[in-house]
Image (cartoon, rainbow, N blue to C red):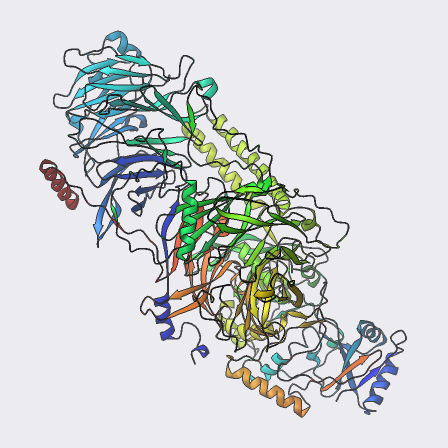
Amino acid sequence: MRRFLRPGHDPVRERLKRDLFQFNKTVEHGFPHQPSALGYSPFLRLMAIGTRSGAIKLYGAPGVEFMGLHEENNTVMQIHFIPDQCQLVTLLDDNSLHLWSLKQHSGASELREEHRFTLKGPPGSPPSATQITAVLPHSSREVLYLGTESGNIFVVELPSFRVLEDRTITSEAVLQRVPEDYCNRRSCELVEALREHPKNPDQILIGYSRGLIVLWDLQNSKVTHHFLGSQQLENLYWQRDGSKFISCHYDGSYTQWPVSSDNRQPEPLENLVPYGPFPCKAISKIYWQTTKNGLPYIIFQGGMPRASYGDRHSISVIRGSQQTAFDFTSRVIDFFIIFSSEPTAEFDDPSAMVVLAEEELVVIDLKTAGWPAVHPPYLASLHCSAITCSHHVSNIPLKLWERIISAGSKQNIHYSNMPWPIDGGSNIAPDPPQRDLLLTGHEDGTVRFWDASGVCLHLLYKLSTVRVFLTDADPNDNMNALGEDEWPPLRKVGTFDPYSDDPRLGIQKIYLCKYSGYLAVAGTAGQVLVMELNDEDAEHVVDHAEADLLQDQEGYRWKGHEKLKTRDGPVRFEAGFQPFVLVQCQPPAVVTSLALHSEWKLVAFGTSHGFGLFDHQQKRLVFVKCTLHPSDQLALEGPLSRVKSLKKSLRQSFRRIRRSRVSSRKRRGGSGNAAEVQEANAKFDQDALQEMELAPVQRKIEARSAEDSFTGFVRTLYFADTFLRDSSRHCPSLWAGTNGGTVYAFCLRVPPAERRMDEPVRAEQAKEIQLMHRAPVVGILVLDGRSTPLPEPLEVAHDLSKSPDMQGSHQLLVVSEEQFKVFTLPKVSSKLKLKLTALEGCRVRKVTVANFGSCKTDDYSENDLAVLTNLGDIQIISLPFLKLQIRYPCIRKEDVSGIASCVFTKYGQGFYLISPSEFERFSLSTKWLVEPRCVVDMPEVTSNNHVHKTGMENAVRKS
Amino acid sequence: EFRRFSLERSKPGKFEEFYGLLQHVHKIPNVDVLVGYTDIHGDLLPINNDDNYHKAVSTANPLLRIFIQRKEDADYSAFGTDTMTRKKNVLSNVLRPDNHKKKPHIVISMPQDFRPVSSIIDVDILPETHRRVRLYKYGTDKPLGFYIRDGSSVRVTPHGLEKVPGIFISRLVPGGLAQSTGLLAVNDEVLEVNGIEVSGKSLDQVTDMMIANSRNLIITVRPANQRNNVVRNSRTSGSSGQSTESSLPSSTPNILANFLQGEEESDEEDIIIEDSGEPQQIPKAEPPSESLESLTQIELLHESTQNGFLPSGEMNLNHSAGSISMEYEIQDPEHKSLEEDGTIITL
């Protein structure tokens, strides 16, 4: 009776819906987009990364993650943890300071913003007077020292951010006893660095940008030592015992200074330009780390010879005669060294170096000879080559999981065995319920296998398809082969490599059968590879076939890229997925759909010209079908990107013109004062807006016709064992849906297993359905007699699914971008439909069947359709009655790449790219929810510290 | 009653002769009848002169279905676009007289001679400043031919005048359906698409809605030029007394929805080609979960077919004329299917 009621009117169903569906964005996987600041707490063993969009992310042991977002969305410039506290301070580019703290709430820790503060100068003072350049949280945990552009150092109380004016260290006070000839040249400098004395908390080292360094006594409010540097200062670092410090400079030099009570104005001990004698770039940060066995580590960022290596992003590690310049593929944002933080320890004994580059995180093991990299358990750079597609496989059988891990471990031999050094906090989330794989296809022809079971997206294995093809890149050309006497001793580290040798290698479609270990991948130049998992290295010939999708169509010329050249003879493949069949579509247009049936040993593929079926057991092409409309010249001539790129390039050139106009305006205004510039810009913006109103965007309203372009583009392929011809006999079938709203159904005859190699697979077209609304077909699905979607191949054989009901009548569900339609089988008559676009104006972008379990009872679950629309909404639509259950806004509709990248799992979760390097994970299910849940406990502190701590907490509570 | 007979395709002769032949074949001399045929789009079109008779014969491929109706029983509204597929809707209207009162038929001219390309509808329920236009794209090769844009209009709100974003017609393609109707003009504000308000929707959403409904597009506009509005004295007119109260389009979805449901169900029949055979329209499966209303409908239809008369007064004679053969065709009452040639699909 339920079905007679209108949705929303059935209280039982409404209650059930609450038990089944719930929308949450749970965790962000990957590497933060545009990181801008790095911080580390040796006390909590937590690392913090700030971004240009104002996000702050904390990472500790795998699974320990926190995220916060500054309301202002301004760039995070600096992050400083308060010593021995669960608190940190961030400085944004609007000069505001923010205090964040980790507080426990119902068993788990949460990151909360507690306070914000903007330093204000006396009325009438220029903004530079209070522009913060350096922050020092004092070890007393009571105050922050804020160095500014004016050279003054302000002191603010924590956590209230009250300015302690009487304790301000003015530049005048500092300059009082500086020799006159030195002082005259260097007045009014900005504070570049503030460092607390490692042994004496009453002394701080202040470095000014033009080279002057002073040791300030906080008790007596006076300078105790002057260090008269002659070079522009970049940074300072204390030696552990406080007897020496080191300064680094703009000219690529670093200087050691002694600190002793007898000489108040000492000369430098040593002044070195490590990559001299020719002019070098600045050394922006330096560490001096002592070790038990004598030789210290000197680690610094930059300093490369300006002319020949000025473009490198490097960090050099020097220890005695060992020296390596780690060469990063993207700009280094910041780095820190993990060393012994025990106050009683005599030496630093550094264990690891953590480098935040613009596009990746690199950790170097400093304890192991050769300084190998450590494989990070999180913060993976998803975009080390641009992601071109993704595929999610739920509930991987343990056997396959172990084999993939073992193949991956063979690839990771050059990594250090060191346990992950950033291990603060503890993960209290329950173990992931199942093993899930996320496969990403990349522009460089690789497929990466990620462990997507839990909070940490972890790379398990990387597969490259490049080896099958002959590419322009010479395989012998080893970029890393450097001679022994090479100087500087550069060593490339990290995996980020945005450059693709050949865009035709790009992976477009992936299909993995988790039961058989068969993997099919398809790419940009019409290549389809079928692979098998092999635990050993092997050398073999890849069978090669060509599929002419145009068949007899005459007189057409493909103007797109050529097909990839294949390698003749046997090819050596490493352990893992090894290709054994290559099918190349002709014309070599991008593969737009792919389906693999591991039980029937068939692979189907489609392009903008048609589709084909290949028997990978007999290695024989079964058939091809051209779907092209004869008038569709665009599809014939070249890849889709040609048309799009023309439009795009036009748009871009317009943008360029507009931008150059903006900048020229700005430059002209630059001669006047700042207000004038702003006014001019505002006026320009207004002009631009008016311009837009005069020539608005318009949209053509036209019915779709069969002659439209790309109607033959094959959008979806589907294998099903169903009743295609008559209701008494079911048979294997292949279904294909096109952009023009056509569904083709082919009846397949697959020989029984014992004669599988002897008899050919046969296919015959049985049906063709033309949807009158001609919208692109994005999904095809057959429901069995119980209205349950047919199981995946081999699912029943592995006892993981009930066998489908072959008694009752089957139904065909066709999902177009605009409508959902259910037809009866074998006689196709329309049964039900749900119109989406005609009523709501949105279109289907992604659709999957998902299983939703109830959070209340273990024994209830149902299958529904999870749908993502072009507006970024997610809708859940019931099966088989096609009733809208619930709708959630998920992605901004302007975020086209986010919508295009979305992938659903079989259990109501999903992923989409929020930046080229980050997946947002979301869940639609109440039952399957993967989100971080972790605790950061205050480590033991000394009794003296404890007093501080409680005092602090009281203060927080009071405020 | 069905008759099947052959005609010489190359020499069809005159209409008068054909009319005589029909009367002869059906043994109904001296009975005035209306003659109609179904064209390739499934529209019922009249045959009443030599020209449309020749046109009809030329479209036969190879069968030509001829419908004959007694003149006094004739329902002129049966002719025109979508008439074949709209039958059940006509039926449901009769079954639900409360929401669709049939007005007495006054024949002014011969509307059956023409095929509608557009119409102004719901004049009685819309405010005078609005116009609801239906474009019959189905069956014509003409492009719809218009463009829409974003814009803003001034509305009276409880807080006074307010500028609100709106969707406007920005351009009409010369020779397109929209232009040729004369019912739509540049700068007309689009208020609804097939009964759904566009306010709050983006330009792209409205574009998608219009394209999705392009086979039966009903748009409600506020014409930029308000001087051509129908002027009627709503207070004295009985039928539009209601319209003054419900002068906002938002208060009409009920009626419209009923109207649309029937329309939409029928106007989009998908096509199936079995075993590379002839394309056919996909029939609607017997709905297992449909409301009681439609169940009754099916029964009634069944009954009426047995009676030989459809309650709407539509003709019962179903003729098929081809060049060589002659056969009877019986509608399958269960599937309510129409065994007709659909749009030709290029294979």
Left or right of A166 in this view: A374: right
The spot of residue A719 in percent (x, y) is 56, 63
The spot of residue A236 in percent (x, y) is 27, 22
**On screen, B53 above or below B195?**
below
Q: Quadrant of the N terminus of chain A?
A: bottom left
| Residue A314 found in image quarter | top left
Left or right of A621 in this view: A836: left
**On screen, A826 above or below A616?**
below
Q: In this rendered view, identify the residue nearer to me: A348 or A308.
A: A348
Residue extending farthest to the top is A181
The answer to whether residue B193 of the structure is visible from this angle is no
The answer to whether residue A201 of the structure is visible from this angle is yes
| Residue A235 found in image quarter | top left
Q: In this rendered view, identify the residue nearer to me: A58 or A309.
A: A309
Q: In this rendered view, identify the residue nearer to me: A813 or A192.
A: A813
Q: Quadrant of the C terminus of chain A?
A: top left
| Residue B21 found in image quarter | bottom right
Left or right of A105 in this view: B143: right
The spot of residue B285 in percent (x, y) is 58, 77
Q: In this rendered view, identify the residue nearer to me: A507 or B52.
A: A507
- How many numbered tags mark residues here? 0
**On screen, A45 above or below A152?**
below
The spot of residue B139 in percent (x, y) is 71, 68
Which residue lies at the image location 44% right of the left edge and 46% below the top edge? A407
